[in-house]
Image (spheres, rainbow, N blue to C red):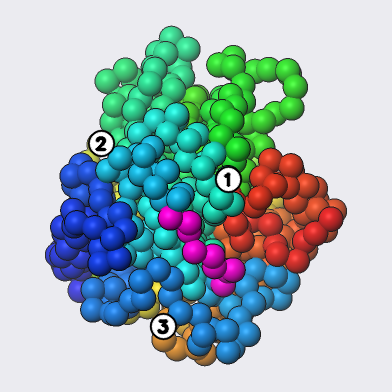
């Protein structure tokens, strides 16, 4: 099946779903007399969002994902009786469940009235909209409850008022960005208020000579780069399509360019954050470096909405490279490919990308696109700089690859040829979905010191190849981070358990090598169970104390990041 055909069908399905949702957003108060309104602009945003993320629709939207159209729903939260009968435990040590429970309390009508005064028409209690915000679009993680109210602030002042009101009534708040995270970050296990930041997407100030930009959190990285291109600048992090700057800060994301430019931690200069009590804090100045006080910027980056809501971000920018070369090379084993990635980094060559695709993934790409690529482990490189420098780097890496059984080394400098080669990597996940229709992906995110990458991938690959599940490896090989797309039928409990077994094996192997359970996707609800082994209970207790100091009522994105068994 051609991938284009799959995209086309997904686009039609996604359009039907979101068009219906957007019409319902303009409904009058519901049968209980509760508020159910949203601006017309908001409805249009839903349609645009669905069409711009067609590939993500494939990932999130197996047939089960769109079953929302025909199901019957309760009015506020989903019934938990069936789940309670099974004694579901999520997030703690040894937990293997994927459905998150939470203590649900009805949102006071007084709070809804206050929010209506603050936001006017920019909030909704419409069920479809609440369900949409309560169910991650790209994750198999689920929650018993969904938000009771979804709000769409337009300013920092409105965010401050929202948090102050929610804190007064001790009602949970779940920040919501581009909804591209995959570890259940936007679940609302305790109901409450979902604060959608999509209307705060302005570029507030661009300082070309300083190579930085001040933006609101709702702007996407792709949209930002479109605006920066005319100035010869770009923001170098490239996570999934549709990711917003606020969400990227919250999860401390990175992407394929991290090997050259670092992660979100390295590319944010300062933040403005609204704390749970409504106070607005600026974490730093615009200076490129500072030794003044605690590093509050880095405290908030990666906090996943558990300490406050980001309302402004100052980003470090880079010059668009003068010239680039994209190269591809084949190898007999993933170990050979990983060894070349390590040798390349050890040589001192400053590559901008080093991506590893295994033979299963290449097979998926061939099937999805009608290609005839050699189905063996493959490395993809990108070299940047002056034309002469980029070519020199390419030649050096070709020599390194030849010493590690590399073959079929090809490279491209022409724009269209580079796009065609890089398309291989960009379509990787969607090709897996096309190869396993009706399945979901459990995507691993382990990262180890670079010297251990070859060992970890080799050890993992033996287990993956022996598994009955379709498993494809995609690695940011230049910084020791690799993902495995483990495709499983969400309606088959044995397949889900097998996917979980493989995930656990890779995580514990990475931790034994002084690695991490998550290199760039974040913790959410899905990775909490690994944190004690990675950090130790003392570190988690310290995190808990920070959380308690800033959020004593535990309203900020509860049941995320810090495992529930941690106390102090």
Residue under label 3, please give it. Answer: 489
**CA distance for labels 2 and 1:** 56 Å
Q: Secondary structure at mark 1?
A: helix
Mark whose residue sits in front, 2 or 1: 1
Residue 231: tell me if it is visible.
yes
Looking at marks 1 and 3 on the same chain, the residue that comes earlier in the sequence is marked by 1
| CB-based contact (under 8 Å), mark 1 and mark 3 | no
Q: Which residue is mark 1?
A: 167
User: Where residue 333 appears, x then y in whole percent?
Assistant: 54, 66
| Comparing labels 2 and 3, the label whose residue is closer to the camera | 3
Q: Nearer the viewer, residue 533 or 99?
A: 99
Tell me the CA gap for discs 2 and 3: 41 Å
Q: For mark 3, does the 10 Å Cα neighbourhood hold few (<14), some (14 to 19), or many (20 or more) residues?
A: some
Magenta segment range?
A: 101-109
Label 1 and label 3: CA atoms lie apart by: 40 Å
Q: Which residue is mark 2?
A: 414
SS assignment for the magenta stretch, majority? loop
């Amino acid at each position: 099946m051609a991938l284009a055909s799959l995209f086309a069908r997904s686009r039609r399905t996604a359009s039907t779903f979101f068009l219906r949702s957007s019409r319902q957003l303009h409904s009058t108060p519901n049968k209980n007399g509760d508020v159910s309104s949203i601006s017309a602009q908001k409805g249009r945003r839903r349609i645009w969002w669905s069409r711009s993320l067609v590939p993500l629709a494939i990932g999130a939207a197996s047939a089960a994902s769109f079953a929302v159209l025909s199901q019957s729903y309760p009015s506020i939260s989903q019934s938990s009786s069936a789940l309670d009968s099974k004694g579901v435990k999520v997030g703690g040590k040894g937990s293997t469940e994927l459905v998150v429970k939470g203590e649900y309390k009805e949102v006071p009508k007084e709070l809804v009235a206050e929010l209506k005064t603050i936001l006017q028409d920019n909030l909704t209690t419409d069920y479809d909209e609440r369900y949409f915000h309560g169910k991650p679009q790209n994750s198999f993680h689920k929650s018993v409850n969904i938000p009771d109210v979804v709000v769409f602030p337009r300013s920092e002042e409105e965010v401050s008022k929202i948090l102050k009101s929610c804190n007064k009534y001790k009602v949970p708040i779940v920040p919501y960005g581009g909804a591209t995270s995959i570890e259940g970050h936007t679940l609302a296990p305790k109901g409450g208020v979902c604060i959608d930041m999509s209307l705060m997407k302005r570029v507030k100030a661009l300082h070309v000579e300083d190579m930085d930009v001040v933006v609101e959190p709702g702007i996407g990285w792709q949209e930002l780069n479109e605006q920066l291109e005319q100035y010869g600048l770009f923001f170098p992090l490239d996570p999934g399509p549709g990711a917003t700057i606020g969400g990227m800060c919250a999860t401390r994301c990175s992407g394929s360019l991290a090997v050259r430019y670092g992660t979100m931690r390295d590319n944010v200069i300062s933040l403005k954050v609204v704390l749970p009590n409504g106070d607005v804090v600026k974490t730093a100045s615009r200076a490129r470096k500072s030794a003044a006080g605690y590093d509050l910027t880095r405290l908030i980056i990666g906090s996943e909405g558990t300490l406050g809501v980001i309302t402004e971000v100052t980003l470090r920018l880079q010059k668009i490279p003068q010239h680039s070369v994209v190269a591809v090379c084949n190898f007999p084993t993933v170990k050979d490919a990983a060894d070349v990635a390590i040798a390349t980094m050890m040589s001192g060559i400053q590559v901008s990308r080093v991506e590893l695709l295994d033979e299963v993934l290449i097979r998926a790409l061939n099937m999805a696109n009608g290609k005839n690529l050699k189905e063996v482990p493959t490395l993809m490189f990108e070299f940047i700089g002056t034309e002469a420098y980029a070519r020199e780097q390419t030649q050096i890496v070709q020599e390194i690859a030849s010493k590690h059984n590399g073959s079929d080394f090809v490279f491209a400098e022409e724009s269209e040829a580079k796009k065609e080669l890089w398309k291989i990597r960009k379509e990787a996940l969607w090709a897996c979905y096309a190869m396993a229709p009706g399945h979901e992906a459990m995507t691993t995110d382990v990262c180890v010191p670079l010297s251990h990458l070859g060992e970890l991938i080799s050890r993992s690959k033996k287990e993956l190849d022996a598994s009955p599940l379709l498993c494809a490896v995609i690695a940011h090989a230049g910084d020791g981070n690799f993902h495995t797309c483990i495709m499983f039928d969400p309606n088959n409990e044995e397949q889900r358990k097998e996917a979980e077994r493989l995930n656990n094996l890779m995580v514990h192997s990475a931790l034994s090598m002084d690695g991490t359970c998550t290199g760039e996707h974040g913790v959410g609800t899905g990775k909490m169970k690994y944190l004690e082994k990675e950090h130790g209970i003392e570190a988690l207790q310290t995190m808990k104390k920070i959380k308690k100091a800033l959020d004593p009522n535990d309203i900020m994105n509860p049941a995320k990041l810090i495992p529930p068994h941690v106390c102090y």
